[in-house]
Image (cartoon, rainbow, N blue to C red):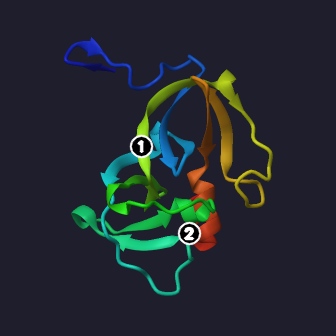
Amino acid sequence: MAQNGKPTEVLPESGTNELEIMEFTIGKEIFGIQVDKVREIMKWMPVKPMQKSHPDIEGIFKPRDELITVIDLAGFLSLSKSDYPERDIFIITNFKGQNFAFHVHTVEGIDRISWSQMKKPDKTIYGGKEGVANGIAEFEGRLITILDFEKVVAEIGPESDPQ
């Protein structure tokens, strides 16, 4: 891909055995999501709570005429909520036509990681029948848990399973 006649370094080339992840934090924990799963990043904004919804659903909001369900990722992972939610971030995804915003604390950046740096996690990591971590990446001295966002959605609302 080129921009202004210059090649960009945003996406890995086909056949390079690499993937790109966006690092984000919840508390002091570092997580990642594959860049191709991210539709956009938005600053936190107030949401409308939904009665009788799953405890990890914060509610809904409607930016640019799109209704988006907000998932409290800290709550889902049993981690501490943010001290300053007004500084937090929503990671917007779309799985099979359904929009979801994952509430995280910070976005740290994008890294290109070799598949050889990825380790398969134990099935018990981060709960659920098979866990919600796709892998653990070791990158520049940090361990980054790569989450399976589709599994998170499926566990919160099995009837809206995007798979």
Q: In the current view of this chain or complex, which residue is farthest to the front?
A: 83
Callout count = 2
Packing grade of label 2 (10 A; few <14, some 14-19, many >=20) is few
Residue 84 image offset from top left, x and y in percent:
38, 60
Q: Classify mark 1: helix, strand or loop.
A: strand
- Compared with residue 49, is residue 74 higher up or lower down, i.e. above or below? above
Q: In front: mark 2 or mark 1? A: 1
- Residue appearing at x 40%, y 79% in the figure: 49
- Residue appearing at x 48%, y 28% in the figure: 111
The kind of residue tagged 1 is Val
81 or 90: nearer the eye?
81
Q: In the current view of this chain or complex, which residue is farthest to the top?
A: 6
Q: Quadrant of the N terminus?
A: top left
Q: Is residue 132 left or right of residue 42?
A: right
Q: Which labelled disc corresponds to residue 107?
A: 1
Q: In the current view of this chain or complex, which residue is farthest to the bottom?
A: 51
Packing grade of label 1 (10 A; few <14, some 14-19, many >=20) is some
- Residue appearing at x 52%, y 52% in the figure: 27
The kind of residue tagged 2 is Ser
Q: Which labelled disc corresponds to residue 160?
A: 2
Residue 79 image offset from top left, x and y in percent:
59, 59
Residue 98 in sight here? no
Q: Is residue 2 left or right of residue 134?
A: left
